[in-house]
Image: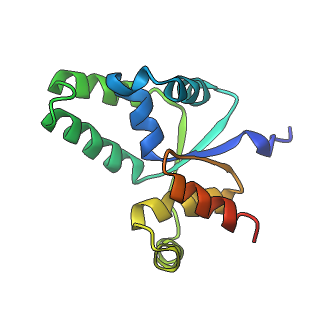
Amino acid sequence: MVENINNYLVVDVSVVLAVLLPDERILEKSRKHMDILLDRDRRIYVPVLLDFELGNGLRSAVLRKRISIDESLDLWKSYKEFSFVLLRVNWLNVLRLAIENKLSFYDASYLYLALEKKAKFLTLDKRLEGIWRRLRKI
């Protein structure tokens, strides 16, 4: 069976947090993203660092009193129900991409994966999305 490459997607932590956090779920964009993340026919790639970034995002939400500790644990469990494909990336290529595009190493990891997999890229970071749009054409 030939897989449809149009169903390949990379999402970054901004999208996952917007879908999970209760005070962001009310936004129309977040509801659309939720539908995408729950689509079992879509292959969603993420770098292994997503676990760490999401954990840190949930921790920050607790410290800022946006959610309780128990809510953060429940949200982590909900996150683990998404059918993401966690992948390792080539760290040297990520570092080069980060330096050349003035990105954080974290953002460059998602960007690298999207470019490597020739996948669509879903992020709430407009600058990062713009860099992806420019580089995918090269």
Q: Where is residue 124 in the image (x, y as percent from the top left)?
A: 50, 44
Q: Where is residue 24 in the image (x, y as percent from the top left)?
A: 38, 27
Residue 133 falls in which quadrant of the image? bottom right
Query: Looking at the picture, does residue 109 appear above or below residue 38?
Result: below
User: In the visual, does 1 lie left or right of 109?
Assistant: right
User: In the visual, does 63 lie left or right of 22?
Assistant: left
Residue beneath the point at 46% across and 24% down: 27
Residue 1 falls in which quadrant of the image? top right
Q: Is residue 80 visible?
A: no
Query: Camera-side residue: 122 or 37?
Result: 122
Check the image and tell me how it is coloured.
rainbow
Residue occupying the far right of the picture: 1
Q: Is residue 117 visible?
A: yes
Query: Camera-side residue: 85 or 127?
Result: 127
Residue beneath the point at 52% across and 58% down: 127
Residue beneath the point at 33% across and 24% down: 23
Query: Camera-side residue: 94 or 132?
Result: 132
Q: Position of residue 138 (x, y in %)?
A: 75, 72
User: In the visual, does 41 lie left or right of 13?
Assistant: right
User: In the visual, does 75 lie left or right of 1?
Assistant: left
Residue beneath the point at 29% across and 22% down: 74
Q: How many labels does the image show?
A: 0
Query: Looking at the picture, does residue 2 appear above or below residue 109?
Result: above
Query: Camera-side residue: 99 or 40?
Result: 99
